[in-house]
Image (cartoon, rainbow, N blue to C red):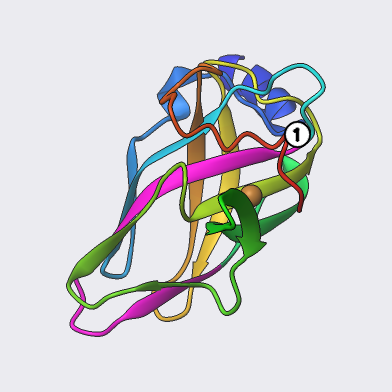
Amino acid sequence: MKFRTCAAIAAFGLCAAGSVWAGDYKVGQIEVDDLWVRASAPGQTNGAGYLDIDNDAKTPDRLLSVTSSAAERVELHTVQTENGVARMRQVDGGIAVPADGEVKLRPGGYHVMFIKLKAPFAEGGTVPATLKFERAGEVAVQFKVKPAGHMPGMDHGHGGMKH
Ligand SMILES: [Cu+2]
């Protein structure tokens, strides 16, 4: 019964069942963990997602794209500062993951941009997504929704930033 409820809610892109949250994910020699988004502020239609990607392989890989039922579309972004103004830019060709290395998507840098959310991200819930790697393939993941004020400091929130 609990699972049923969860599945129904998941159709709107959010699922609050804690048991679904596994913490980290593996596909090939890629390990993904610490996936999170901030809870949406009122009226906010986009959301940024962050995660760590570890590559144990002897060959580099690349995060090519992300899809999610929680948003109309999903892009990979980075933040570049020009004339003192931080602007988000779509990443061409995906995000490189070095051989035997890692890449961290963090506020102020690379992030997964969920555009036109189907429902606001609710604190304590999860956001389903599928990550597609060039070599390792696809992996279904859940981003955990953290409080709106999580990791303050460089708030690159999408209110003031133009896409
Ligand atoms: Cu962005």
Q: Is residue 47 left or right of residue 147?
A: right
Q: Considering depth in this image, is 126 or 85 the residue closer to the camera?
A: 85
Name the residue located 64 percent from the left edge and 18 percent from the top edge.
122
Q: Position of residue 124 (x, y in %)?
A: 52, 16
Q: Which residues are magenta?
A: 46-64
Q: Considering depth in this image, is 148 or 56 the residue closer to the camera?
A: 148
Which residue is labeled 1 in the image? 11
Give the residue type that dot 1 points to. Ala
Whether the magenta-drawn stretch holds residue 54 is answered as: yes
Whether the magenta-drawn stretch holds residue 119 is answered as: no
In this rendering, the answer to whether 97 lies above or below 107 is: below
Name the residue located 60 percent from the left edge and 22 percent from the top edge.
39
In this rendering, the answer to whether 150 lies above or below 34 is: above
**Residue most extreme to the front:** 83
In which quadrant of the rendered image does the N terminus lie? Answer: top right
Q: Position of residue 138 (x, y in %)?
A: 50, 66
Q: Position of residue 93 (x, y in %)?
A: 57, 79
Q: Is residue 134 left or right of residue 116?
A: left
Quadrant in which residue 88 is drawn: bottom right
Name the residue located 27 percent from the left edge and 75 percent from the top edge.
98
Dot 1 alpha-carbon crowd within 10 angstroms: few under 14, some 14 to 19, many 20 or more: few
Mark 1 vs ligand 1: CB under 8 Å? no
Main SS class of the magenta portion in the image: strand
